[in-house]
Structure formats: structure tokens, C-alpha cells
Amino acid sequence: MSEENLNEAKETKDFIRKIVEDDLASGKHKQTITRFPPEPNGYLHLGHAKSICLNFGIKQEYGGRCNLRFDDTNPTKEDVEYVDSIMDDIHWLGFDWDELHYASDYFDQLYEWAEKLILDGKAYVDELTPEQMKEYRGTLTEPGKPSPYRDRPIEENLDLFRRMKAGEFENGRYTLRAKIDLNSPNINMRDPIMYRIIHQSHHRTGDKWCIYPMYDFTHGQSDSIEGITHSLCTLEFENHRPLYDWYCENLGIYHPRQIEFARLNLTNTVMSKRKLLQLVQEGLVSGWDDPRMPTICGIRRRGYTPEAIKLFCQKIGMNKMESLVEMGLLEHCVREHLNKVAPRVMAVLNPLKVTISNWEEGKVEYLEAINNPEDESAGTRQVPMSRTIYIEKTDFMEEPVKGYFRLAPGKEVRLRWAYYLKCEDFVKDENGEVVELICTYDPETKGGQSPDGRKVKGTIHWVDAASAIDAEVRLYDKLLLCQSLSDVEGDWLEQLNPDSLKVLTGCKVEPALGTVQPGYRCQFERTGYFCCDPDSTPEKLVFNRTVSLKDSWKPAKGN
């Protein structure tokens, strides 16, 4: 984020930053310590980016610290692949952590605390099945009823728990539950599970453990161990806060403050890790980094920039109310940044051959083109031009309609960075399709200026046929047909946009792109912003459309 945008963010304080400032001003905390605690069971998406920008942003703005902590308490779903990808995503966004931790670092301490609660009569080993437990827990309108095992003697609970740890029992045979309040209106407080038996090797601890703590028994204690000052969570954890508080208070340990904010809901896409995994597993996308996916690796491959993501997170801000954010705002932020930094090049996606009849055979001329009119330091490049060029098929119309200012029989246009071009004739194939234009150019109009003062209204892009490079272009669009899945009944997969990807082959790009590497971002003039894809080879370039040039998003009045 630029210094200007960072200063703007500081001037517009959200409710979380106001809490932070009040705590610092009162002396409650000398320094902020936040954390980003993902579970390594999938790839991060834009919702996680919002949390990353918040936690690491507070570190930067207030001179604090921010830890990365992996919530690795479920070995059946977690993998080192996800750990590595999460680290890479955070670094790509431009952040770094002060300390790296794993919840598994604290397994020994968590176990000791579990025994303490047993000894204090505040936890017990239960034998109810998940179905029975659900029945005993009650409903939102009916209180729960005690498990038959709720009043086991402390010594028996301790013995069973130690035998659970020793691996004597099969999966699901026992659980350890906190003894809290079966009449609580908050179901999370009705004797929640603390530990369950999972005979599964862990990616860090191996086979040392066969019992694993639940997230709710890990979260607050991990925050406490690390001295977190502000534990920032999304709103779905608001009802879990009383449990967070209960564990800290009853263990007699340092008690951080949990603060909740609204999660990111974005139109026309999926923000559920479970549904994203389904798309990958069923082969409906090419992988986690498919450019249609809202994963950080997906939008990175598509050509989005870290600066654009930070600007987006700044614009949507932090609040307590759930809302649906328009995809158009995200695309607006991407355009805003790429317009400043992306080099301009010419590419023809649907080529139409043009022969310039009055151009000397064998002559090649190099024309100077500006790389980025928004950035003088980007300099210029030399664009070759010879007797045969390509233009877009849509830039010619045999019988032009009213208001059409591009090429037509007897009509003249300006070639970008080059000359005036006039259509004299055209050639059709056996199907009646125009396959070639015969044109003339005016050598006195180099640079697009006419010495006799005549004006043309249309300017079109083009590429030189002799030096053009073949490319495949992938046009990406919104993943979902509907704005939100919240009101969709039935199979959500029916909402997938069948036109979310269109692949164009036989495209022609100017030779300046011949040496670019995957990740290179540029603007195809008059078309949109594009990014070189990792599928590119020296023999065949592949470009992904990041976003079109047209910006339909408009800020609300007062913004």
C-alpha cells in the first residue's frame, strides 16, 4: 500500500483501531500483539486476505507485533502443502510475521490444562455418541440435560483421560467435555467437547498424540501463551467468545480480548473453503490456483496485485454488520493499480489480415511507442511494422452502422503509434467471410497526425504479421451466475457460470512480449489487463485476462 493510501487508512479509523488506540492510550497495553491463525486444511482466499491485512496492518500502523500461528489440531484434514502455501501467500501480500507458531507447539501445555480442569471438577470424560450428545445438548428453546457420565468421580475421569492419551481406545469411544452450564442460552456453553480421539499421524508431531484438542480449547490458550493483546476473529466466533473467556478465567491464565468483525462476502463467487475444495476435487476448476477461484494463489495467477488487494481491504473497511461486497469494487481496485504500473502493449485476439498495398516490399519500420502514459519512467519501445499487419476482426465492418468509426470500405482510421490507414478492398473466402483487407497508408501521417489537418475519429491497435508471436488468451469471467449462494436452494453447482472461461487460440501479440516470464502483467491496449500464465512456454505464450478495461463500479453517494 502506498504511503498516501496508508495515511488515508489511518485517518479513517474503524471500530477495531479505535479500541486499539484506546488501549494504548490508557496504558492497558504498551504494544499491540496480534496473530493470524489459519488452519492448514486448504488454500487461503480473499476473506483471509482481509484478516491478514487487518492483523499485520495493525502491527505496521502501531509499531506492534504480529504472529503467524497454524491451528493444526485436526490431522485428518491438514497438510504441509497448505502450510507452505499460506506462508507464500502472506509474503506475496507484502507481510512478514514476528514469530511463527503452531497450535501443536502447545499440545503438552494444553494437556496439562485439561488435567487441571478435571482435577478442579470442571471437565469429565463422556461416552455419548455424537448423535446422543446432540440430543442431550437441547435446542435454542430447550435446555440441555446432563449426560449419564457427567458426574463421574474425578479419579475415574483422570484415569480414563490418561488412558485415552495412551491410545487404549478406538476413535469416538470417549470425549473429554467441559462441565459448564446445560441451561445456558448459548449452546456453545453446554458442556462443549475439549478433546476427541483421533488415531492419525500429525504432520508435525507424528504419532505422539492420538487425542487432539478442539479449536475452542486451543484458541484462547494459544493467544494467552503468546501474549496476544487483541484476538481478532470473524463474526461466526462471537458466540464462542464466552467459551474463550471461560477457559482463560477457569485456568487462571492471562486473558486476551477477543474482538469480532464481519467476514468478507463477495458477489458472484464462492467464499466457503468446503465448496472451493469441492470444485477442485470434482475437477470443475484446474486447481486451487485456477484464476476463477477467489484463492490468493488464484487471483495472483490471474494477475491481481498485492497493492490492489490492500486497497480493496482498505475500502471495504471493518464493521460488525454482515454485507455483500460487489465484485466490481475489487475489479475497480485492480484497475486503479494496474493503470499506474502496467506496461501497454498491442495484442490482436481475433486476427484479420491486412495487406498495405502501397507499402514497399521488404521494408520494416520501427515506430516509437510509449510504455505507460501514467508513468514517464516506463520509457518507450520500438514497434516493428511491415507490409502485412493484423487487426481485430471487430475493427472492420463491411456495411458500417451509424456511429461506427473504425475501418470500413473507403473509410480511414488511425493505427496506434503509426499511420492513417484506408480500406480500399477486401477478400472473402468460400463461406463469405472477410479474410483479408487491402489497404493503403498515408506516409505523411506518422505518429497519427495529418499535415493537411484532416481528422479521423477511430484509432485501432494492430500487430506486425512478420514479427508477431502466437499466443493463447484465456478470458475469465465471474465464477457464479448468482450474486450470492445464501438464497440458493438445491444444488449450488448449478449456479456455476458456463462461460467463466473462454480460450482463444491463434492470437497475435507484438514481439516485445517474446521474453516475458510468468507473472508479467500488462495492458493489451483497448482490450484489458492481462498476465502471463505459468503454462506459457517459449513456443507458446499464454495470457490470462485479469480484468477488462471497462469499469462499471461506481462508489455510493457520500463516498
Image (cartoon, grey):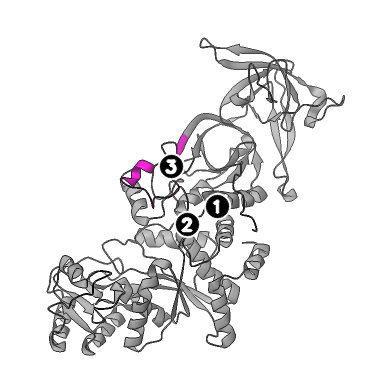
Q: Is residue 60 above or below residue 421?
A: below
Residue beneath label 1, please?
330
Disc 1 marks a residue whose amino acid type is Leu
Q: Residues within 10 Å of mark 2 (few under 14, many from 20)?
A: many
Residue range highlighted in magenta: 477-502
Q: What residue is rendered at 68% in x and 19% in y?
A: 408
Q: Earlier in the sequence, mark 2 or mark 3?
A: 2
In percent of width and height, residue 396 lies at 64, 22
Position of 468 compared to 192: left or right? right
Position of 231 compared to 246: left or right? right
Q: What residue is rendered at 54% in x and 78% in y?
A: 19
Q: Nearer the viewer, mark 2 or mark 3?
A: 3
Disc 3 marks a residue whose amino acid type is Leu
Residue beneath label 2, please?
46
In percent of width and height, residue 67 lies at 46, 73
Q: Residues within 10 Å of mark 3 (few under 14, many from 20)?
A: some
| Magenta span includes 254 | no
Quarter holding the C terminus is bottom right
Q: Which mark is residue 481?
A: 3
**Which secondary structure dominates the residues rendered in magenta?**
loop
Distance between mark 2 and mark 3 Cα atoms: 19 Å
Q: Residue furthest right?
A: 452
Residue in front for this viewpoint, 184 or 367: 184
In percent of width and height, residue 433 lies at 55, 15
Quarter holding the N terminus is bottom right
